[in-house]
Structure formats: C-alpha cells, structure tokens
Amino acid sequence: MEPKQGRDIWAALQAGEQDALMQLYNQYYVGLINYGVQFSKDRGFVTDCITETFIHLWDKRSSLPSVQYPRSYVFTMFKHIILQHFRSEKSREEREGRYQENIGQLEASPEENLTKQQHFKLQSGLLQKTISKLSARQQELLKLRFYDDLSYDELSEKCHITKRTAYNIIQDALKTIRQDLRSQKDFPLEDLLSLLAIIFTPLFLNR
C-alpha cells in the first residue's frame, strides 16, 4: 500500500499547492526515468515526457481524481504520454512522406507535379501568414522546437526561461495557429506539425 504521505501530497496537489507537485516530482523522477528508458533509450525524450506529465498534472489539478495509489496514476499517465508521442511520430513520418510526394513524383505528369507544388505553396503561404501574426518570442520558440528539434530542457537553458514557460508559449502559439487556420478549407490541420518543420527552414526564413 502506498504510504499515507503520498496520498496526502496528492490531496494537496488537488488543492492547488505547487509544493506538492514538486514533492511528487522529486519522489517519482528516478523511477520514471528507469521506467521510461524501457520504452526509449533517448533520455532527452524520456525527460521531456516526464516534464509533460507533471505539466499536465498541474494543469488538471482541480479535476484530478482521488486515488489510493498516486504513483500508479502518475506512471500510467507517463506511459500514455510516451505512447502518444510514438503514435504522433509515426503519423508525422507518414505525413512527411505524403508531402514528399506532393513536392514531386518522378512518375507523375508535369501537370500533376505543378498542381501539387502549387497546392503545397498555397498551404505554406497560409501558414507563413499566420506565423507572421505571432509574437517574435513565439516564432523563435516554434523554430527552436520544430526545426532545431530542441527539447524543453534545451529550450529552457537557451532562452533563459522555465520549461513550463517554454511549453506554455509553444502551446499558445499552436492554439493561435489552429484557430486562425480552422476556417481555411485548403489547409489540413492534421498536417500542421509536419508543415511547421518544413516552414522553419533557411529557405523560408530568409525570404
């Protein structure tokens, strides 16, 4: 049975005490690392998932259920976040494959290639226009995250902000982009993240 102290800390987290979040983080961090490397040997990826887990716990603190075993709840959430990233990565690779086809297939006719390139250019233009409305800070962090592929730890160190602040800036930017593009019938929102990686290239940044 989990010590009563663990359940008391969980109750404090539900009540909005930030110290309780840090206590859980300190208690479970090593165990989460050891658990996470069973799924991925990339420790940077694992620590990013741990960060996301505790950000999610804090954001949802008022609606968290009362549980007898907080450790099991946290580890289960952590596992779901890891698996969600795996599914997203597989989907991203599939989408990038489709965009490579859109850029040009050797077997396609010149007319088909032209149509696909025009469609890609239209989508890129819509996304660039939306990104230009973001703050300079949001644009900077999006580029560092999706083109330079920095982890939240690296973002925190490079930009001299906390990991939570970096996460919030990026999520707010993505929310703004999705809201702005939702009315655009020519833009597939499910391809947003893979397009961001393409948009933030020297080719587009130097235009």
Image (tube, rainbow, N blue to C red):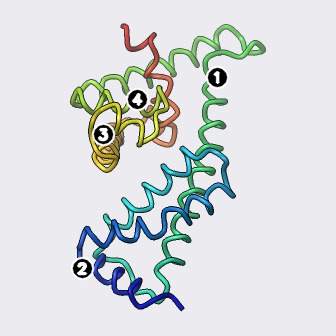
Element type at mark 2: loop
Name the disc covering residue 173, or none. 3
Residue in the picture at 33% in, 66% down: 22
- C-alpha span from label 3 to label 4: 13 Å
- C-alpha span from label 1 to label 2: 49 Å
Image x and y of residue 29, in percent: 48, 62
User: Alpha-carbon neighbours of circle 1 within 10 Å: few (<14), some, or many (≥20)?
Assistant: few
Name the disc covering residue 13, or none. none
User: Alpha-carbon neighbours of circle 3 within 10 Å: few (<14), some, or many (≥20)?
Assistant: many
Inspect the image, locate mark 1, and give the three-letter code of the amino acid beneath it: Gln
Inspect the image, locate mark 4, and give the three-letter code of the amino acid beneath it: Leu
- C-alpha span from label 2 to label 4: 35 Å
- Whichever of callouts 2 and 4 sits on the residue coming sooner in the sequence is 2
Asked whether disc 2 touches disc 4, contact meaning CB atoms under 8 Å apart, the reply is no
Element type at mark 1: helix
User: Alpha-carbon neighbours of circle 4 within 10 Å: few (<14), some, or many (≥20)?
Assistant: many
- Whichever of callouts 1 and 2 sits on the residue coming sooner in the sequence is 2
Asked whether disc 1 touches disc 2, contact meaning CB atoms under 8 Å apart, the reply is no
Classify the position of the N terminus by image quarter: bottom right
Element type at mark 4: helix
- Where, by quadrant of the figure, is residue 160 drawn? top left
Q: Which residue is mark 4?
A: 144
Position of 66 relative to 169 (above/below): below
- C-alpha span from label 3 to label 2: 29 Å
Q: Which residue is mark 1?
A: 100
- Whichever of callouts 3 and 4 sits on the residue coming sooner in the sequence is 4
Confirm whether residue 183 shows in the render: no
